Each structure stands twice: as structure tokens, then as C-alpha cells.
Amino acid sequence: MPEADLILHNANVITMDPACPTAGLVAVRGNKILLVAAGEELESVRGAKSKVIDCQGKTVVPGFNDAHCHIFGFIRKLRSLDLSPSSVGSIADIKAAIHRQAQSLPPGQWLIGTDYNEFYLAEKRHPNRRDLDEAAPDHPVVLAHRSLHACVLNSKALSLAGITRETPEPPGALIERELDTAEPSGLLFEMVGYIRDKVLPPPSEEELAEGMALANEHYLAMGITSLQEASAANDYARWQTLKRFKQSGQLKSRVSMMFGFNSLSQFRQAGLAFGSGDAQLRLGGVKIVLNETRGNLQPPPDELKGQAMSAHRAGFQLAVHCVEPGTVEAAIAALEHIAGRSSLAGRRHRLEHCSECPPELLKRLKNLEAMVVTQPPFVYYSGERYLATLSPERQRWLYRIRSFLDAGLVVAGSSDSPVASDNPLVGIYAAVSRRAESGQELLLNEAVSAEEALAMYTASAARASFEEDIKGSIAPGKLADMVILSADPLKVPPEQIKDIRVEMTIIDGRVAWEV
């Protein structure tokens, strides 16, 4: 047996490998796992230069894999004014926070806020341009809703965006108007991406580097060793940016990057195919965002089917954003359209969110060899709002997990960060307990076991990006990405899972972060 470079022993290892579910020792040589064993083999792999870590009985799991997140959106959040419910409780609070921030900025500089949530505001409404004008009359202001499906602009920002009373609504978007004047109220739906990409000035290289440093430290502290970047705005330029950060070592976690359909030609012209790259940065699937505004689908069904077929024939995995039943049905119809003309076998096309999936849609979905990438943290962080604002009929099919697994679907876990916190242990807790932060339960019949939930953030997440051969479990020959936890999520009472702490994160056989 070759000498190991790193040895974890006296450990409670949950491998997620059916051939060897538990172990007491893991040995690493280079960046790969050399040996997984009961524990008595320590001396057979220990060498003069081996780094030996006594885990003192603590739990070791595969590195967490967030199967749907937004790295650059998270960086923007880290650099923005926090208007989440923990920071503000009313529109008056929002105005006061904006006013304070404006005092430190030169006139004309953009002021960006994030994470406001009208459900938790005393006024139970969105802010509007007049509120923001009062707080910061000399600055363009944009506030992003927690969901990132809405934003609010003040008058200066609306002017810079070119949005006036005469502006038509973009396809799939909604510009709210004041009833008495027909002027834009400042509230925009499904336009956050447009405002960020086309209106706001891009961050400087220095700002981006500072943000990435903060994000990198955060991901390591969460035990997230792999990220699946799911932004439809991703293009070849974003790929090059990630490549720079990966090559410089400024981002340690591995990345699989999805990209928007409109950028497909860029990657093909560059000679890149699905799976291009390496274990550090890999080209993922084609992201298509399906929205439904006033009963109209965007993109329209025929256009969606054409895009889906083009990406499929180009050899790419599809990742279709679908939330409401109408968009879920359209996504399924697009896959059925492909199935009528080509084989879906082995393609693992993905439904991102699949938030409301009634039985008749689930019946169709299970015949398509598709995967579901869901967000258990939404149950925890938004469950109270769902119960208060959605009809009982809609609640019955909300963020299902048990039903998907029982139907034979592979389900990966994710956060959609920065929409929700990306702490994987909160996600695992929510999948197991179906309990909101308020303590209320949401569809307890959709709960899964702790082991099934852990698989969603490890083995199944790796499968979602076609990387199960190299990561997702602790087994010989796989990448040495592991996390040491303060407690065993499979043994503690469910209520304690969310409080488990990451104590060490290992990537490529090296300690990347520790308490």
C-alpha cells in the first residue's frame, strides 16, 4: 500500500458509497482517496510525511455540492445594503437604511439594496419609487426582492434604465404603473437580470476580486466544495472570468457552469462541448428560464421546444427553470417534444425548482428520465409565507421531494443562493423536517430521511452534473473532497441537524478551511 499524504482516522465516516457505507479511516494520496477502511489499517498507510488528523469520533461526509446557485449574484449581495427581515421591519426602516447609506456615497453613485421581503414588512407592500426618492433623492437606487423576481427603482434609476410611461413591457416581464398617472411605480417584475446586466455599471476588477475572496471564504466555511453556477446570464466571458479565479486559486470550490441558450453559439465557436474543462471548472448545461406573466409563457411553447431541441442535438444537458404548474407543464412538454424525435436515454435533462408539480405532471415527468433540482431551504425560509399566501390547493404540491423519489426520479439539493441561505445543513434539515423557520410544517408527507437528504447534497448533486464518477461519495479513486462535522446528521434528532457546524473542509486532499 502506498504511503498516504493525508489520513483521517478515529472518524465516523459516512461515505455515501453503497459498497462501503461507513468507515473509520480515510487515506488520501495526492488529490485522490487512496483507502477507505474500518480503522485498523492506519499503520499500513502512514508514512514519515503523512499528515494524520485524529477526528476524535467526529463525522466525515463527502464535500457538499450546491446543485443550483448563483456565485456572482452572491458576490453582489455581499457588496449590497442588507434589507432582509433580520435588518428591517418596515418601509420606514428601509428608507432610513437607504438614507444612511446615501450619506457615505457621492451624489450620482448607485445605491444597491438586497433581500427586502414585503411579506415581513409592517406595511405589507413593496416600496415604490416615491419612497426611495425621499430617502435618496441624489442617487439612483435599486432594491432587489428576496426572490430576485422583483426589484424597485427610484426615479433616477428609472430614468437611467430608460423606463417611462411609454415603455412597453418586455416579454415575460411586468412594469407596475401608478393608477392615477400611469407612470411606472418603480416596481418591476422579472427584470432583475436586465437591470443588473444592462443598466447597473459592472463591478471593477478590484471589486470583483474582493467579492470573490469573501464568497470563497464563505463557501469553504459552509463545507461547499462544489458549486453548480445556474445563471442564465452566463456566457463565454463569464466562463473566462471563472477560469481566471480558478487558475489563481481565489476560488477553491469546484464549479460546473451552466449558461443561457443565447450563448450556445459562443461556446460551440470556441470548440467547447458539454463537460469541457476539468475537475476544477466544467462546462455544464444550457439554462432556459421559463416564466408565466398574465397567463403568457415566455419563451412561448414553440420557441421553448425549438431551443430545447437545439441544445439537446448539440449534446448539452438542459436545465429548465420552472416554478408554477404552467411552466412545469411547458418544460415537460418540451422534453416530450424531444422524446418524440430523439432519445432521452442517459441525457439527464434537469427541471430547476419544479416547485409546484401536481400528480398529473409528475406522472408525465417520471417517463422522461429527467432530474429535479430542488431547494429545500425555501421550505425553511419561506414556508410561513407560502402557508399564508398560497391556496390550500397549491400548497398540496409545493416543493415535493418524497413523491419525486418514490416515482424513481433522482433529486438533487440546492439553495438558489443568494435567494436563500446556502447552508447545506439547513437544507438537509428542511428536507427531513418540512418545518419552516416559524415552526410551521409544510407537507410533512413530502419529508425524506436524513440519509436521503444528505445524498441530495452529495451523490445526487454530483449525478446532476454528470460527475458521479469523480465525486459525491468517499471511495478509492475519487477526489478527496470531504467535510468534518460537529455531529452526525443521521443520528442526531432532526431538530438539531440545522445546528450542526462544519469544522473542517478538505479539497483535493488539502485542508482548505478549519475552525
Image: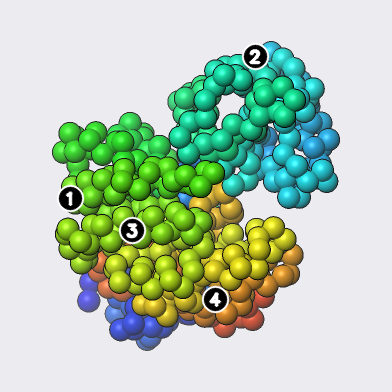
Residue sitting at x 55%, y 47% = 418
| Callouts 4 and 2 close, C-beta under 8 Å | no
Which residue type carries mark 2?
A: Gly
Q: Secondary structure at mark 4?
A: helix
Residue 118: x and y, percent? 72, 45
Pick the front one: 17 or 110: 110
Residue count near mark 4 (Cα–Cα under 10 Å), binned few <14, some 14–19, many ≥20: many
Lower position in the chain sequence, tag 4 or tag 3: 3
Mark in front: 3 vs 2? 3
| Residue at the disc numbered 2 | 108
**What type is the residue that disc 1 sits on?**
Arg
Of badges 4 and 3, nearer the viewer stands 3
Mark 3 residue crowding within 10 angstroms, few (<14) / some (14–19) / many (20+) = some
Q: CA distance from mark 3 to mark 1?
A: 17 Å
Q: Earlier in the sequence, mark 4 or mark 2?
A: 2
- Mark 3 or 1: the one toward you: 3
Numbered disc in front, either 2 or 1: 1
Q: Is residue 91 visible?
A: yes
Number of numbered markers: 4
| CA gap, disc 4 and disc 2 | 50 Å
Front-most of residues 375 and 210 = 375
The residue indicated by pointer 4 is 446
Instruction: For label 2, count other residues whose C-alpha is less than 10 Å away and answer few (under 14), some (14-19) or many (20+).
Output: some
Q: Which mark is residue 333?
A: 3
Secondary structure under tag 3 reads helix
> Mark 2–mark 1 contact, CB under 8 Å?
no
Q: Could you say whether the residue bearing mark 2 is in a helix, strand or loop?
A: loop
Residue drawn at 74 percent across, 17 percent down: 137
Mark 3 vs mark 2: which is more N-terminal? 2
Mark 3 residue type = Ala
